[in-house]
Amino acid sequence: MNIKKKSLKIKDRQIKDIILTVTLKHLLNLQDNYPLNEL
């Protein structure tokens, strides 16, 4: 049970990291209109 909870937390964190990265890329794109394809 404990292991399952831990892996769920890791997955949740990965999802948050992905959302953060996408949001950052989007904000940077809006700022200087420069595509950040290499991230």
Image (spheres, grey):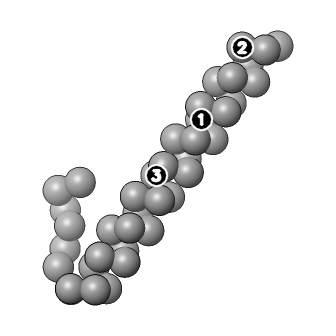
CB under 8 Å between callouts 3 and 1?
no
The image quadrant of residue 22 is bottom left
Task: Give percent across and percent down for residue 29.
Answer: 27, 79
Residue 18, label in figure: 3
Q: Please rate how many residues cluster around mark 2, counting C-alpha atoms within 10 Å: few if below 14, some from 14 to 19, many from 20.
A: few
The image quadrant of residue 38 is bottom left
Pick the quarter of the image with the N terminus. top right
Task: Give percent across and percent down for residue 8.
Answer: 68, 30
* 36 w.r.t. 9: above or below: below
| Separation of residues labelled 2 and 1 (CA atoms) | 12 Å
Q: Earlier in the sequence, mark 3 or mark 1?
A: 1
Q: Residue at x 50, y 58 (%)?
A: 19
The three-letter amino acid code for the residue at tag 2 is Ile
Q: Residue at x 64, y 24 (%)?
A: 7
Instruction: State left or right for residue 13 relative to residue 3.
Output: left
Residue 3, label in figure: 2
The three-letter amino acid code for the residue at tag 3 is Ile
* 36 w.r.t. 33: above or below: above
Instruction: State left or right for residue 33 relative to residue 7.
Output: left
The three-letter amino acid code for the residue at tag 1 is Lys
